[in-house]
Amino acid sequence: MFPNKQTEEVKLLDGQLIASTLFLLNLIIAMILLYNQKLNVTEKEPLFDQETATNIALWNKIFAIILLGYFLYVSYVTYEDTKDTERGEDSSIQLFSSSLVFIASLLGLYIILKNYNTSNIPFIEIENPEI
Protein backbone atom coordinates (compact mmCIF):
# COMPACT_ATOMS: atom_id res chain seq x y z
CA MET A 1 0.00 0.00 0.00
CA PHE A 2 2.70 2.49 1.04
CA PRO A 3 6.48 2.31 0.49
CA ASN A 4 7.15 1.68 4.15
CA LYS A 5 5.34 1.03 7.39
CA GLN A 6 6.13 4.45 8.90
CA THR A 7 4.64 6.25 5.89
CA GLU A 8 1.52 4.10 6.12
CA GLU A 9 1.13 4.84 9.82
CA VAL A 10 1.57 8.59 9.28
CA LYS A 11 -1.08 8.55 6.51
CA LEU A 12 -3.52 6.72 8.79
CA LEU A 13 -2.85 9.14 11.65
CA ASP A 14 -3.36 12.13 9.33
CA GLY A 15 -6.63 10.60 8.18
CA GLN A 16 -7.72 10.04 11.77
CA LEU A 17 -6.95 13.66 12.65
CA ILE A 18 -9.06 14.89 9.73
CA ALA A 19 -11.89 12.44 10.48
CA SER A 20 -11.86 13.37 14.18
CA THR A 21 -12.12 17.06 13.30
CA LEU A 22 -15.01 16.32 10.95
CA PHE A 23 -16.63 14.23 13.67
CA LEU A 24 -16.60 17.31 15.93
CA LEU A 25 -18.51 19.15 13.21
CA ASN A 26 -20.94 16.23 13.12
CA LEU A 27 -21.47 16.53 16.89
CA ILE A 28 -22.04 20.30 16.64
CA ILE A 29 -24.72 19.72 14.00
CA ALA A 30 -26.35 17.14 16.28
CA MET A 31 -26.32 19.62 19.16
CA ILE A 32 -27.99 22.27 16.99
CA LEU A 33 -30.67 19.75 15.99
CA LEU A 34 -31.21 18.82 19.62
CA TYR A 35 -31.55 22.50 20.56
CA ASN A 36 -34.02 22.91 17.69
CA GLN A 37 -36.03 20.01 19.12
CA LYS A 38 -35.99 21.67 22.55
CA LEU A 39 -37.35 24.87 21.01
CA ASN A 40 -40.15 22.84 19.43
CA VAL A 41 -41.02 21.13 22.71
CA THR A 42 -41.05 24.41 24.64
CA GLU A 43 -43.24 25.95 21.91
CA LYS A 44 -40.67 28.56 20.99
CA GLU A 45 -39.68 29.52 17.45
CA PRO A 46 -37.42 26.70 16.18
CA LEU A 47 -34.34 27.28 14.07
CA PHE A 48 -35.59 24.83 11.41
CA ASP A 49 -38.98 23.55 10.35
CA GLN A 50 -39.58 19.81 10.80
CA GLU A 51 -38.79 18.92 7.19
CA THR A 52 -35.49 20.81 7.22
CA ALA A 53 -34.51 19.32 10.61
CA THR A 54 -35.31 15.83 9.30
CA ASN A 55 -33.19 16.39 6.19
CA ILE A 56 -30.29 17.71 8.26
CA ALA A 57 -30.57 14.71 10.62
CA LEU A 58 -30.54 12.32 7.68
CA TRP A 59 -27.47 13.87 6.05
CA ASN A 60 -25.72 14.20 9.41
CA LYS A 61 -26.29 10.48 10.05
CA ILE A 62 -24.93 9.59 6.59
CA PHE A 63 -21.92 11.83 7.26
CA ALA A 64 -21.36 10.04 10.61
CA ILE A 65 -21.56 6.63 8.92
CA ILE A 66 -18.92 7.67 6.39
CA LEU A 67 -16.64 8.82 9.20
CA LEU A 68 -17.28 5.67 11.22
CA GLY A 69 -16.56 3.62 8.10
CA TYR A 70 -13.16 5.27 7.90
CA PHE A 71 -12.47 4.53 11.58
CA LEU A 72 -13.53 0.92 10.95
CA TYR A 73 -11.08 0.79 8.03
CA VAL A 74 -8.28 2.11 10.27
CA SER A 75 -9.13 -0.53 12.89
CA TYR A 76 -9.00 -3.22 10.22
CA VAL A 77 -5.63 -2.05 8.85
CA THR A 78 -4.24 -1.88 12.39
CA TYR A 79 -5.56 -5.37 13.11
CA GLU A 80 -4.00 -6.76 9.93
CA ASP A 81 -0.64 -5.20 10.82
CA THR A 82 -0.64 -6.41 14.42
CA LYS A 83 -2.62 -9.67 14.47
CA ASP A 84 0.54 -11.78 14.86
CA THR A 85 2.11 -9.55 17.51
CA GLU A 86 1.54 -8.91 21.20
CA ARG A 87 -0.88 -6.09 20.23
CA GLY A 88 -3.01 -8.49 18.18
CA GLU A 89 -5.61 -9.16 20.85
CA ASP A 90 -6.10 -5.45 21.55
CA SER A 91 -6.39 -4.75 17.83
CA SER A 92 -9.00 -7.46 17.39
CA ILE A 93 -11.06 -6.05 20.27
CA GLN A 94 -10.79 -2.56 18.74
CA LEU A 95 -11.89 -3.91 15.36
CA PHE A 96 -14.84 -5.69 16.99
CA SER A 97 -15.92 -2.56 18.88
CA SER A 98 -15.57 -0.39 15.74
CA SER A 99 -17.74 -2.90 13.89
CA LEU A 100 -20.44 -2.74 16.56
CA VAL A 101 -20.51 1.08 16.51
CA PHE A 102 -20.72 1.04 12.70
CA ILE A 103 -23.61 -1.45 12.77
CA ALA A 104 -25.40 0.60 15.47
CA SER A 105 -25.06 3.68 13.31
CA LEU A 106 -26.55 1.83 10.33
CA LEU A 107 -29.50 0.88 12.53
CA GLY A 108 -29.86 4.54 13.51
CA LEU A 109 -29.95 5.47 9.82
CA TYR A 110 -32.65 2.86 9.31
CA ILE A 111 -34.75 4.51 12.05
CA ILE A 112 -34.39 7.91 10.38
CA LEU A 113 -35.28 6.49 6.94
CA LYS A 114 -38.23 4.57 8.39
CA ASN A 115 -39.62 7.76 9.92
CA TYR A 116 -38.45 10.09 7.15
CA ASN A 117 -41.88 11.23 5.97
CA THR A 118 -43.27 11.63 9.48
CA SER A 119 -42.43 13.95 12.33
CA ASN A 120 -41.49 10.94 14.39
CA ILE A 121 -37.68 10.91 14.47
CA PRO A 122 -36.72 9.97 18.02
CA PHE A 123 -34.58 12.36 20.05
CA ILE A 124 -31.87 9.71 20.34
CA GLU A 125 -31.28 9.77 16.59
CA ILE A 126 -30.69 13.50 16.66
CA GLU A 127 -28.52 13.72 19.75
CA ASN A 128 -26.27 10.70 19.15
CA PRO A 129 -24.83 10.96 15.66
CA GLU A 130 -22.13 8.42 16.39
CA ILE A 131 -24.72 5.71 17.04
Image (cartoon, grey):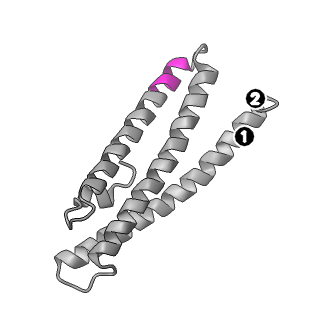
> Could you give the CA–CA distance between mark 1 and mark 2, rounded to whole angstroms?
9 Å
In the image, is 62 to the left or to the right of 73? left
Q: Residue furthest right?
A: 3
Residue 92 colored magenta?
Answer: yes
Crowding near pointer 1: few (<14 within 10 Å), some, many (20+)? few
Q: Residue furthest front?
A: 117
Report the residue at 51% width, 49% height from top: 67
In the image, is 83 to the left or to the right of 125? right
Report the residue at 44% width, 66% height from top: 28
> In this picture, which residue range is highlighted in magenta?
88-93
Tag shown at residue 10:
1
Tag shown at residue 5:
2
Quadrant of image for the N terminus: top right
Q: Nearer the viewer, residue 103 or 6?
A: 103
Q: Is residue 14 above or below residue 100?
A: below
Mark 2 residue element: helix
Residue 27, how many percent across, how many down?
A: 43, 60
Total residue callouts: 2
Q: Is residue 6 above or below residue 87?
A: below
Residue 32 colored magenta?
Answer: no
Q: Amino acid at mark 1?
A: Val
Mark 1 residue element: helix
Q: Amino acid at mark 2?
A: Lys
First in sequence: mark 1 or mark 2? 2
Residue 36, how many percent across, how many down?
A: 30, 75
Q: Residue furthest bottom?
A: 45
Tell me if label 1 and label 2 are in contact, CB under 8 Å: no
Residue 11, how many percent across, how many down?
A: 71, 42
Q: Nearer the viewer, residue 36 or 93?
A: 36
The overriding secondary structure of the stretch rendered in magenta is helix
Say which quarter of the image contains residue 119: bottom left
In the image, is 37 to the left or to the right of 28? left
